[in-house]
Image (cartoon, rainbow, N blue to C red):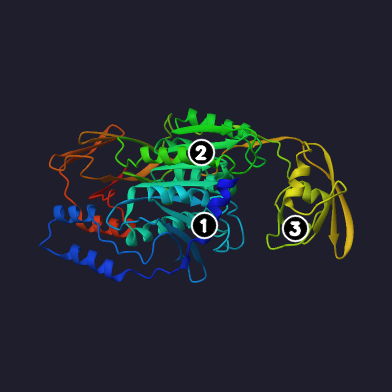
Amino acid sequence: MKKIVIIMIIFLSITLSTYIFGQNDAWLNEINTLSIDENITDDSLYTILSHWNTYPEPDSTGVFITYFNQISDTLKAPYVLYVPSSYDPQKRTPMIVDLHGGVSIKEFYLLDEGYTQDVLFVPFAEENNWLMLFPLGNIETSWWDLQGVRNIQTQIRTLKTYYNIDDDRIFLTGFSDGASGSFFMAMTSPDDFASMYPLNGFLSVGSIVTNRPTYLPNMKNRSLNVINTDLDGLYPAARMRLLIELALEAEANILYKEYWGIGHVFDYAEDEIPIMINSMKLQPRDIFHPSIYWEAWTPEYGKCDWIEIIEIDSTMEKKSWHQEYQIQLPDDRISFGFYPDDDFDYDGIMVYNLVEGETTARQMGLEEHDLIIKMDGILIHSLEDMDSLKTFKQRGDSVSLTVKRYDEEVTLYGQFPDTTYSDAIIYSKPSGAVRADYFGNEFVLETSGVSKLALYIHPDMVNIDLPVKVIINGEIYFDNYIETDREFMMDNFLRNRDRTALWVKRMEFWL
């Protein structure tokens, strides 16, 4: 506990600045000038961009700086960057992206709050001279919503314009919803990250909340170091273990660890964060790995490194290796089924809204704006009081809530439902899948449910001076020399700001 107090003092003593990024016109002009300079060959341009090292000196270091991503005319998402004291714009600097929990909230966290758990990483970032990015999300930019995914990607790629971020050493972590978001990014949009570290999350939250599929075999392409705890009231280890076993059956690249005697809190941080940091140091991103499996239900999540699914056709033959991984998860959690009002700061729990469906709250007759003051006749001052009382309940038990409604006290009676079972993953949409390998200059691809795909080529993957052969489903689709596509290379660099993933050719194939 003493160490945590010291960390908090460090955090509160550091300057918190606010800034809205404008368009970096000088940077764009310089890149565009290089692009159109006919005296610079394609090979020279590739060398210049892949070794790009022109970044401004920061105004200050050892600080938290707040930036904003203008998503639309009405939505501006904040994010916070920690710049270590020894940051050097001439050196490629690793970065940890830390997703917070409780993302399904109406408003973004206040910029000076919400870092009780996140800040525990900061002394390690400072010690190792790493940047730290704290995206802030809400119900419109949740970690498993496409707008939320794009929001995180935009933040990373915008910061790459101003800070010398090491493209191959960006690591994703998060607690609770942040951990569930880390799983979701691993299965839908891993390109920016080297590895993921989900803490006290649940692998299939993104699928369940969105009612859309996620695919366990997609976690072959990045390593995940996962931790859950046995007394976690939201995502207990016993429940999570069932999904981890299923993911390992799908050959996901997961290292799973449990802590016992701990609830839904980051009490193992002192022991685990140094291990995580050491693991990160040993696991840089490898976008040129010679084998990829990738599956998607929409082209929005169709790309993983050098493979992209462009169009899906559910009428095409589904291969035997293209399978759904599914288990029935027991739901024995004790939940009323209501959302509390986060802005209510007085005694009791104010009901903001009710969860859809058949819930204990609806069965009891709980209503919006009810103020819950007792459970089973015992006074309740906060959600923590209710959670403590719920630990004595089991599925099938009766329960009562006393509420204030229009200045009257009303006692409501109900019963928690018996244990139910439901699908772990929601396979609500048909998918397309690709198995791809390359050896030397030869690419061999198998597809299932895919009518169009793209292959990305990089000089570090193949010998550009020799012919490239592409075999798809046993047929030769290409066997020839390739040339650098200057326009594509520039467009890709401008969009992704990635010096390593500087693809020189994108080849599209109709199947």
Q: Do residues under tags 2 and 1 come within 8 Å of each other at their CB atoms?
A: no
User: Which one is nearer the viewer's eye here, 301 or 38?
Assistant: 38
Amino acid type at mark 1: Phe
Of badges 2 and 3, nearer the viewer stands 2
Neighbour class for label 3 at 10 Å: few (<14), some, many (≥20)?
many
**Left or right side of 264 for 295:** left
Image quadrant holding the C terminus, namely top left
Distance, label 2 to label 3, CA atoms, is: 36 Å
**Left or right side of 277 for 482:** left
Indicate which disc residue 272 carries. Answer: 2
The residue where tag 1 is placed is 11
Q: Is residue 210 visible?
A: no
Amino acid type at mark 2: Glu
Distance, label 3 to label 1, CA atoms, is: 33 Å
Placement of 430 over or under 53, stated as above or below: above
The residue where tag 3 is placed is 351
User: Which one is nearer the viewer's eye here, 441 or 23?
Assistant: 23
User: Which one is nearer the viewer's eye here, 22 or 385?
Assistant: 385
Q: Is residue 486 visible?
A: yes
Placement of 44 over or under 205, stated as above or below: below
